[in-house]
Image (cartoon, coloured by chain):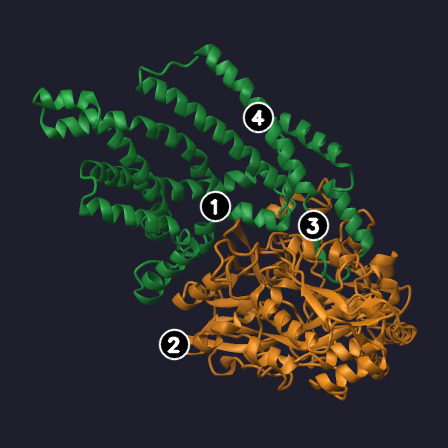
Amino acid sequence: MANFLLGRLLQSLVLLLIVSIIGFAVLHLAPGGPLSQFALVPGLSKEDLARIAHEMGLDRPLPVQYWEWLTRLVGGDWGRSYRDNQPVLAVIAGRLPATLELMGAAILISVFVGIWIGVMGAIRSYSLFDMLATVGAMVALSIPTFWFGLIVIYAFSVNLGWLPPGNRMTVGGDGSFLDYLHHLIAPALVLALVEVAIWSRYMRASMLDVINQDFIRTARAKGLPERTVLWHHALRNALLPMIALAGVEIPTLLGGALVTETVFTWPGMGRLLLDSLGYRDYPVIMGILMFSALLALLGNLLADIFAATADPRIRLT
Amino acid sequence: MSEDRRNETIPLLTSRRRLLALGASAGALAWAGPKMGWIPAAEAATPPSKPTGQAVIGLSQEPTVFMPLLAHIEVDEGVYFNLFSPLWRVDEKGEFQPDLVAEVPTLENGGISADGLEWHLKLNDKAKWHDGTPFTADDVKFNIELIQNPKFLAGRRSGIDLIQDIKILGPSELTFKLKSPYAPLPSIISWTFLVPKHLLEKAADFNKPEAFLANPVGTGAFKWVERVPGDHITLAASDAYHGKGPYLEKLIFKYVPDLTVLYTQFQTGDVDYIGIQGITPDHYEEAKSLADRVVTPVPQPFIENIAFNLGNPIFQDAAVREALYLAMDKQSIIEQIYYGLPSPTESFLPRQSWAFNPDLPKHAFDQEKARKLLDDAGWKPGADGVREKDGKRLEFTNSTTAGNHVREQAQQLLQQTWGDIGARMTIKNLPPAVMWGDYWNLSQFDTTMVGIDFMVGPDPDATQYFASTGIVAKGGAGNNTTQYANPDVDKLLADGAATVDIEKRKAAYVKMQELTRKDLPFLPIFQYAMVQGVKGKLEGFTPNVNVQENCWNACTWFWAS
């Protein structure tokens, strides 16, 4: 186990380094830059712009810029945002609660509902329910989230007035728990729609795999009640592949949802990434990139460890 | 960027630049006069005796720079107008009103000497910083010297850099001299928001005054409460404000990145006022019918135009520019694509400006005349219908921000009507960070569709855009991206800025507008107006074409009971 962890750690470091080099190069070599926003600000001369570029460190050769960024990062300094001059880590930390809240709610819904639909679809495969679930999942995966979000807002906020049209809390309100919850419903459901579809499809496939295996037949032959067979023997085994899926979901959980956060005016990581890309806020974009890469690696590592714990057939070497 | 983008899966990156801020605007009533648009019912209702309630201002861009002297963009100014104060501000009639001064210095009251060089300022001795420290002449001196400091990343330096010999005569009195007379200076000062000396002189790095940026202190009607990044900024009424108001307890700037979503939040009442880009033209009809909402087009100083790159040989031929103007179906662009909201123009100045020239030759859509003009100039149609002259084909690109659907439609219309006369235009749109970078600044485009405010605040001085010294591609300092160089224009601009005699100035700018109309370095299309939306009972608004941000007078907004 210790060897495994050490190996994984080294592997991760190399991967992170490669990610950072590619990310940095692509970002800086792409045309445009953070100064373009000042194009039509009256009174800014070429000299002023050059001074700002110098302050941002943009006037140095790319490898030098990368090296400086990397050495600072190793020393714990993630740099400062060009947009509002705050430290990158503080900027990211400021967006995490909103994202965790939204993604947590959405994933919670999708895991439970998705697993339930998947299991039901598997044990009654090709029934009406299964057909509907299959078609439903395809539809859910195909609907553009942006459009669907707006439809939900028009229906439930503008016409019916049941739900707020976005935002994390009432603007200028005191932010009670119920207020937060009220604002969470629509974006979490819209986001969960796609996730439910994904989880239900994986779960159905996995469950179908399991219930046709010998040990299930044995369990039934022993005279165990069908409920025990399904929910105890079959489900436990069918859930194993889901652990890997959950590992992949961890970066998503913290990475935010670009589209849903935009439609529902949710101040999370997804919006931060979009805003930073639009502004070419290099330090923040690099920060988000490294942060997501770290989470992805961590998520996969955790998934492996949990899978090994849950399934004695897997050995970590 | 205020175009309809409902069909996009990922909405446009919200670039914070003002020329993008323009996609959609309006202005049927825009040219009625200085009091155009709707007049607030403030005369009827009376403001409360003490600050009451809150107003939520919806913005599609996020203010992020809270030190007003640093380089910033116009969305930040909406916050500045309420948190900070300039020495004087410009009202909707283009007149200066005292703010941090007791009276605005003029030739008449002796505040400015006859040659325009010596200035005498008397400050408002009631003004205080939000932390209770009195505002004094020392602060004014500190601000001027900070802007002049070459190491400081100032957002605007022109004009202020002419100030010298600052003498403090008392806590609320000072004088200074100018190196040379400069007429736009009062306008520039009306845009310069002052910062406290006692807090900023302590900052380790005046380009990154961290403590101040996190908790800015001004002299405005509202004081800082908090910023939730990516979401909103809250200001609260200041009890020590030296001017009229404030009548609201809280002012909230809410960032709603998508314009369709912003409109929806206005519909549901979560947002009380839509600023900056306003309501998109396609929602105008629907918005007008909303209960308890006042929706009105208000004029803006931005001029939508086709900017030529005169460095490109084919555009050096005046006949080509003239022919392309003749073959532009301006009326269809305005009526069909912009829902008839903006007003056609021939000038680079908004018609509300005192220097506006109303007698410029009117554009007429005439493709026959355009063809004849090109024939006479020697541009002969080639085998594929595209005209040629001396081996050069009349073929070029037109660029603007990618994803701006409204502009794309206008581009397609131009493509058609220009194609009809043998000019082949290809659309080459780029993402904002690319479009408005070197591509624009260093004149790497052929033609660009862009909305520009050519003025300096309310001042018609357009030196930045038309003086031959402002061509960055040729090493100049300015925004002359069309590379327009006309010695007569250079002289008129210099004359216009060097005298404080308003009649002489007007004569210079009127003549200048004739020259740009004749030379056509850019093809004027229309003057923007934005569709402003406000809740019925929120009163005290006055549209002001002289500022870029309509929250300029939020200190006098109030809820009618």
Residue B239 % position (x, y)? 54, 61
Instruction: Tell me which residue sits at (51%, 66%) in the image.
Output: B4
Numbered badge on residue A238: none
Q: Reply above or below: A111 against B395.
A: above
* SS label for mark 1: loop
Q: Colour of chain A?
A: green
Numbered badge on residue A15: 4
Q: Is residue B215 left or right of residue A237?
A: right
- How far apart in space, not on screen, are marks 4 and 1 (Cα)? 26 Å
Question: Is the same chain shared between marks 4 and 1?
Answer: yes
Residue on which the image places disc 1 = A268
- Disc 4 chain ID: A
Instruction: Tell me which residue sits at (64%, 77%) in the image.
Output: B92
Residue on which the image places disc 3 = A32
Q: Which label's residue is closer to the chain start, 3 or 1?
A: 3
The image quadrant where one finds the N terminus of chain B is bottom right
In this rendering, the label closer to the viewer, 3 or 1: 3
- How far apart in space, not on screen, are marks 1 and 2 (Cα)? 33 Å
| Number of other residues with Cα within 10 Å of mark 1, as a class: few under 14, some 14 to 19, many 20 or more | many
The answer, for residue B357, to whether it is visible in the render is no
- Disc 2 chain ID: B
Numbered badge on residue B291: 2
